[in-house]
Image: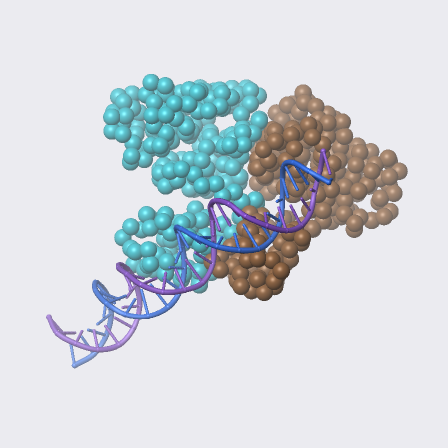
Chain colours: A brown, B cyan, C purple, D blue
Amino acid sequence: MKRERIEEIAEILDKRGKMSLDQLEKEFPSVSQMTLRRDLYQLEEDGRIIRIRGGAMSVKEVQKVSGEAYTKKTTINTDAKIVIAQKASSLIDEGISMFLDGGTTAMYLSKEMPDIACNVFTNGIAVAMELAQKKNVQITVVGGQLMKDNLSTASPAAREYFAATNFELAIVSATAFTPENGFSCNSQIESDLLKQVFQKARHVYMMLDSSKIGKINPYTFAHIEDIDVLITDDKFPKEYKTIFEDNNIVVM
Amino acid sequence: MKRERIEEIAEILDKRGKMSLDQLEKEFPSVSQMTLRRDLYQLEEDGRIIRIRGGAMSVKEVQKVSGEAYTKKTTINTDAKIVIAQKASSLIDEGISMFLDGGTTAMYLSKEMPDIACNVFTNGIAVAMELAQKKNVQITVVGGQLMKDNLSTASPAAREYFAATNFELAIVSATAFTPENGFSCNSQIESDLLKQVFQKARHVYMMLDSSKIGKINPYTFAHIEDIDVLITDDKFPKEYKTIFEDNNIVVM
DNA sequence: GACTCCTTTGTTAATAGCTAACATATTTGA
DNA sequence: TCAAATATGTTAGCTATTAACAAAGGAGTC
């Protein structure tokens, strides 16, 4: 109920742009003002709204007012990514040692995942920052050149480092997928890093929201048979699903 | 006078992102709080800022916040650190290759510093994220275990990596200083890393706000004679100043 | 210069909104 | 089913904001 209410508040705010607490109280007569305040506080922490005196304002509205375009990457298929991230986070067991990539889906995953004792290796600094909130998660950041577009790092040195490291699990996502070209991304060093990770990981979970399907990016880092589990959303085409299942891959 | 002040407020806010009225009052000691309030009100009408409780926020900041998670850590001696960071940022030349640590002062420095072409190595992921906003800055993140308290990394591997890297300049800060025990911090691996950095850096600038003075932390990584320039605030004790100057260190 | 009009700035009191702290209810999970 | 964690409600105190009025400049006119 909290989750839904917060979601609804966010939606209303995105629609109306700006609302006072009084107005919100009228929309949600069943809860107290304080609860709404707390909801707004949380939405602010998530970066979805800005609290102003007497109410709140949607970030979208701000961006509209200021007239500037905002990065669309964070908004593509957000809901699907969150669902996927939730699903993936439920698969993480206590004490596990895992690799997590630096993509937006991994970002949501690190928000959703429970605060259990485990070891996470990541090349995404935004992911690392998010995970730093969790008391019990041990984080190791992969060093290297920082790519500003996706806030992740990669370097030859990191590749070597991973050659001497073992993971129980690697959870990654691709920016493009076709059955013929497999999973691909836009950066060669990232692709190299992921290849290395795949060699050392016992299990590989791929998070792939349906917007990535049918696209091809320059650097392929894995093929269908390289992964163990595919986590996707309900818009995932049925015909593809059978391809994965024929390779003994669990599709979620 | 009004016009210029408003312009200046807008600029400062674009840089710092978010400021309290208290801080603004310190920046503009010659006018009353009410005047600043009115200025903010006007800037809001112009769509350049958003007024929030206790201060204001630049629209640019809003766009940034909407992308990432938002940590609202309030730190000690913020104002002094900002002053120190401003001073330090004025010392950075185009094309330089430098190391920056992961502390809060370095964080402010990365906000204040101009967007010039240069190479920055850092072990602070918050610093790296901040620098990622600058188009012309090349960033390299040091990998390793993430320490959650200060969001910086350190590892033996990183030490080796730096053994093969040269810097023109290292800008670091300590969490404690006494003349006898030198500059110290709370983590052994961080201390090791800094020692290595000091060996490879041609010049070392130390940022030290006065709240650190007289304190001792477990791991000393440098002594007075190891640094070239000390950047501090105006509460820095005079008797200490002479100690530094006797060692040919520029005190700012 | 003295006067008026207009803009900017400062001061104060009253109010609205926020936070913190605790109390209660509800959910989760063992 | 119980205990622990999470979510919600209630209150009191406090802080920031507003509004209204007063004072101080600036600009133009006689």
Image quadrant in which the C terminus of chain B is located: top left
Residue B225 shows in this picture = no
Residue at 36%, 49% in the rendered image: B22
Judge by depth and name the residue closer to the eye, A72 or A77. Answer: A77
| Quadrant of the rendered image containing residue B244 | top left
Q: Is residue A172 left or right of residue B240?
A: right
Judge by depth and name the residue closer to the eye, A63 or B237. Answer: B237
In the depicted structure, whether residue B140 falls above or below residue B63: above
Residue B230, image x, y percentages: 34, 29
Residue at 65%, 23% in the rendered image: A160
Residue at 59%, 39% in the rendered image: A130
Image quadrant in which the N terminus of chain B is located: bottom left
In the depicted structure, whether residue A49 falls above or below residue A90: below
In the depicted structure, whether residue A168 falls above or below residue B48: above
| Quadrant of the rendered image containing residue A155 | top right
Residue B218 shows in this picture = yes
Q: Is residue B56 left or right of residue D26?
A: right
Q: Is residue A88 left or right of residue A107?
A: right
Residue A59, image x, y percentages: 56, 55
Residue A237, image x, y percentages: 82, 49
Residue at 35%, 38% in the rendered image: B80
